[in-house]
Image (cartoon, rainbow, N blue to C red):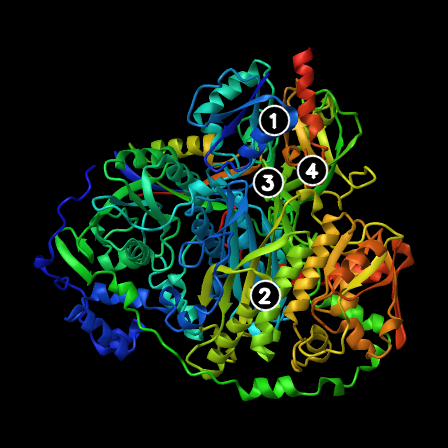
Amino acid sequence: MKVGVVTFPGSNCDEDALLAIREHVHLEAVPLWHKDHDLQGVDVVILPGGFSYGDYLRAGAIARFAPIMQEIAAHAKRGGPVIGICNGFQIACEAGLLPGGLLRNDHLQFRSMPVTLRVESTATVFTREASAGALLTMPIAHGDGRYSADAATLDRLEGEGQVVFRYVDATGHPTSAANPNGSLRNIAGVSNASGTVVGLMPHPERALDPLLGSTDGLVLFRSLLALTKA
Amino acid sequence: MTAQRTPPSASHGVRPRPGDPTITPALVAEHGLTMDEYGRLERMLERTPTFTELGIISALWSEHCSYKHSRPVLKTLPTQAPWVLQGPGENAGVISIGDGLAIAFKIESHNHPSAVEPYQGAATGVGGILRDVFTMGARPIAMLNSLRFGSLETPRVRYLVAGVVKGIGDYGNCVGIPTVAGDVMFDPAYEGNPLVNAMCVGLLREEELIRAKAEGVGNSIIAVGARTGRDGIHGASFASEDLSEENEAKRPRVQVGDPFTEKLLLEASLELIRSGHIVAIQDMGAAGLTSSSAEMAERGDVGVTIDTTKVPVRETGMTPYEILLSESQERMLVVATRGHEAEVQAILAKWDLVAEVIGEVIAEPVYRVTEGDRIVAEFPGTRLVTDCPQYHPEARESEEAIARRTRDVAAIAPKGEEADPAWTLERLLQSPTIASKHWIHRQYDSTVRTGTVSGPGAGDAAVIRIRGTTKAIAVKTDCNGRYVYLDPRVGGRIAVAEAARNVACTGATPRAITNCLNFGNPKKPEVFFQFREAVYGMGDACRALETPVTGGNVSLYNENPQGAVYPTPTIGMVGVLDDAAHATRMTFTTPGDAIVLLGENTDELGGSEYLSWVHGVVAGAPPHCDLDRERALIGTILEAIRAGQVRSAHDCSEGGLAVAIAESCMGDRARPTGARLDLTAWGALPLRALLFGEAQGRIVVSTAHAEAVLAIAQRHGVPARVIGQVTAADQGLTIAAAQGRCTSTIDRLATAYHEAIPRAMARAAAETVTETAGGTR
Amino acid sequence: MTRFTVSVKIVPRHGLLDPQGKAVTDALHTLGFASVRDVHVGRLLVIELEAADTAAAQAKVREMCERLLANPVTEDFVIAEIAKA
C-alpha cells in the first residue's frame, strides 16, 4: 500500500505525516505536490496540517482549488481513503468531502495542548482497528477548530454514525471543560457517509512515539493496514 | 534575464539625485549622526555625501548594525571551543553535535517595534530570527522567547502581553516551527519598554553550512522573496533611540509580517542552498538591502554594485534611498554563481516567489549603488562597514545601585501575615514572574515537527530530539535583570550559570550560548558600567562552564521617561543529550521517592522575588555565584541522570527552595504529588532566607536511589542531603524547619500558581476591543 | 467594459456563535455603551473588476462569493455597494 501526503504552499505537517507513515506504520509514503494532477498511484491520501495559502481568506478555502484537489475528489468519489488532519480537515470541509465547517475557536485564541478523544465510530477505514468508546490522547494545535453545522446536519451525522471522535474529559465524558474550541456537540472528527473520508482537528501523527508522550495516534494508521489484508 | 555586466565606472562620479534634499546639519541630526560622525563620513568620501549615502551610513552606523559602543567590550567574551563551527559575526552561530550534524542558533531583540505595535513587532521579530537561522543552511526546529514586561496590574501591560504573545504565536505557528521554551518576567522597571527577544534553533548537516560572504567576481546578486515597500524605513536607527511619547507617532515605521511568505521562503532557501547554485545568502533584516549587501561585501572583501531600478517593488515612485533602507519583511539577498541565475529563479518560482538580479560582485573595491545609469552612492572599499566609529564611553556605577545593593535587607521586618510561611509561599506562586506561563504556552504550537520530547513548562529546559540519532538538544533562555541591576558582574555570571543549570537539569551538557544584551543608553556612564560589568560577568561564567558565545545581538537605548530598564543580558543556552531517553522533567512523579537537595542553603535574600513581590523592595546584594561550584553541580546532575538515578530535577531560582518544591509537586496540574520536607538541618538560617532566599547552585532532585545520588555528589564535592519524601497529592506539602512550619494543600498551591496569569489576562480580554491584524488565525 | 468597485460584506451565518462579536459587545458594555444590543464581526472585501454593466458586475461577484469568498456552511455575504471606478 502507498500513502500520499499533499504539500500545499503553507502546509507544515506534511513532513511529519510522511515520517509517521514511513517510520511508525512502515508503509511507502510519497509527497504529492499541489500543482500536480498526478496521485502517483497512491491508495490513501493524507491532507496534512498547516496554514495552506496562509489561511488568510478562511482556513482551507483556497487550497480546495489546488489542481491536486480535483484528483483527490475523484479518488474519494471512487471510495479511496482520505484523511484530513487539522488544516487538512478544514480543506476537506471546504472541498465538500466532509460535512460542516471549522470556525474560529470560541475563545478566539490558538490552542496547543493534549486532548482526550473518545472513539465514537469504528465504521471508518481509519478507526476500524479502534474500540468504540476507547479514549485516545493526542495534541491539538489550531486557531480555527470549532466544528459547526446546522442542527439537522448534526442530527443526521449522529444518526448515521458519522461523528468519529468527540472531545471528552479524562473519564470519557464530553463536558464543556473538555471542549478546547467550542465545537458543537464536542465533535473533534467526522467522516463521510461511507466512512472512507475522515477529518479531525487533533494530530494523530504527533502521537506515535513513546518518547513524545503518547502512541494513541497509531490506531488510525494501523487501521489502514487492515485494508491491505482485506 | 541577464546580469548587469558593465557597471558604470567610478569616473562617472556620484551626483546628487534631482529632488533629493540637500545635506544640512539638521538633516544629519535627523539621521542620528553626530557632527563628528558626519565629518568622518566626509573624510572617507573626500566630498559631500548624497542624501542616499547619508541614509546608508545612518543605518550602518546605528548601534544596531555597528555595535559602535559595544564592540570593544564584546571582544572580551570567549568564542572558541572545539565544537564551535561558527562564532560571532555571521547570521547565526553554529556548533557541532556529532554524527556530522550541527545546530545553528541565535537570539535577537525586537523591543522597540513591540513597544509600539506589540502584535506586528513580535511577529516580525520571530520572522527575522528564523531567517537568520535558515540562511545558515539550517532547518529551524525550535523557537524560544524571552519576554520582559512591566507590572501585569496595568491595562497597557496586559495589552502588550496579549499582543506580543499572539504575534509570536501566529507567526511561529503558521511557519510550523514549535515554540518550546523561554522565560517571562514582570517588573515595573520594564514599564513602557518591554523586551521581546526571540531565539531560533536550527539543525543542519555540517557540510551544508553556508556563510553570508559575497564571493566570485562576476557572480550575480539576487533579491529574493517579498517585494520591497516603504515599511520600516530607518527601523535600525529607530531601534537605537530612546522610547518616548513621540514614538507613538512613528508607527508607520513598524513592519508587517507575512508568515506564509516566510514559510515559502524557508523552503525555497533551503532548496537553493542544497542546489549548489548559490555561494551566499543573507536576510535583508535591519537596514534591509543596505546592510545585507554591505556586510556580504565586507565579509567577502570584494566590491559590489547594485541597481535599485532592478529591485522588485510593491509601491510606485520609490527612491533609491527608500529601496535601500526599506525593512519590508520576508526578503533575502543571494549571491548566485554566474550563469546559474535561471536555476535560482526556477527554484523560487516553484515556491511562487520572485527573484531578480539586482547587482553583481565586482573586483573593483567599491560599494556602488546606481539608479539605472546614475550613480547615487559610492563608498571606497568596504570602509562603510569597517570605518564605523567606535566609542569607549565612560563607565561609572550609579549611586542608587550602590545604595540599594548595600542596604541591610535583613532589617526589613516581615509582614504580619508572614507568620504563616504558607501565606508567603502562596503569594509568591501568584507572582506573574513565578506563576505558570501556561496561558502563554498554550497559544504556541509546541508539538509540530514531532520532535518535542519535553515542551514548555515541563522541564527546566525544552528537549528536542534529533531524528536519525539517539540524541537530543536542550534549550533555554534566562536572565534575572534585577540581579544585574544590583550587581552587574554577579548578575551576568548568574544569567549564564542559571541557563546552564536549567539545561543540565534535563540531562544535557551545556555547550554554547547566544546572547541578547538589552541595556539603556550607553552614553550614560551608569548604563555603560552595567553593560561592561555584565559582559565581564558573562565572560567569567562562559569560561568556567565551557559554554562559549557564538553570537547574538545588542539592543541599547531601552529607556522610557522613567529611565533605563533593568540591564538584561538574556542568555540563550544550547545543550546536548547523547540519549534523548534521559530527558528529565521538573515534576515529582512517584510517592515514596526521596527528595535530595544538591547544593547549599544560605542566608541570602538580596535581589529576591520575595523582597520585590512581597515587600516592594529592590535591594540587597544578589546571591553569590561560585562558578567552580556551579560546574561541579552540573557535573553531578549530569552523572546522576545518565546513571538513571534521577526521576525529576528542578533548579532553585526565583522564589527559592520552597517555590521549587511547590512547582515540583504541582507544576504538572494533571499529575500532582505532595511532599514532606525536613529542613531542620538549617536551623541557623532565618526561615524566610531558607524558604525563599535565592541562593545559587541548588537543584531539587527526586530519586528512588538517594544513596547513589549522594555518592555521586560527594565525588564531585557538591553538598547534598536528603531533605524529604515525595507523597501522594492529598498529603499536601509540609515543610518542617527548626524555625517554623509551612503546610498547605496542593490544591491551594496549584490554584495560586496556575490561575494567577489567566485571571489577570481575563481582564485584558474585556479591555481589548479591537482584534489585532492577522485575519482569522 | 467598465471598471467597477464592489464591496462585499461577509459575516458569520445568522444564528451561529460569533465569539468575536460577543467579545466586542462585552467590551463596549464595559466601556459604558449599554445600549449596544449585538455586534457582528466579519470581513469587508473590496473587489475591483471590469464588467459590461452593474448587473453583470453584481452577478460576477455573487459567483465569486459562492465559490470562494464565503463558506455557505458558516457565512453569509451581502453585496454592499457597487460603484463605477
The residue carrying mark 2 is B544
Q: Are marks 4 and 1 in contact (CB under 8 Å)?
A: no
Residue lying at 43% horizontally and 30% vertically, measured from the top left: C63
Judging from the image, mark 4 belongs to the subunit labelled: A
Q: Position of residue A142 (x, y in %)?
A: 60, 42
- Does dot 4 land on a helix, a strand or a loop? helix
Callout 4: few (<14), some (14-19), or many (20+) C-alpha neighbours within 10 Å?
Answer: some
Can you say which quadrant of the picture contains the N terminus of chain B? Answer: top left
Amino acid at dot 3: Leu
> Which one is closest to the eye, mark 1 or mark 2?
2
The residue carrying mark 3 is A103
Amino acid at dot 4: Leu
Callout 3: few (<14), some (14-19), or many (20+) C-alpha neighbours within 10 Å?
Answer: many
Q: Is residue B388 left or right of residue B633?
A: left
Q: Position of residue B331 (x, y in %)?
A: 36, 48
Q: Position of residue B222 (x, y in %)?
A: 28, 45
| Same chain letter for marks 1 and 3 | yes
Separation (CA) of disc 4 from disc 1? 31 Å
Separation (CA) of disc 1 from disc 2? 46 Å
> Which one is closest to the eye, mark 4 or mark 1?
1
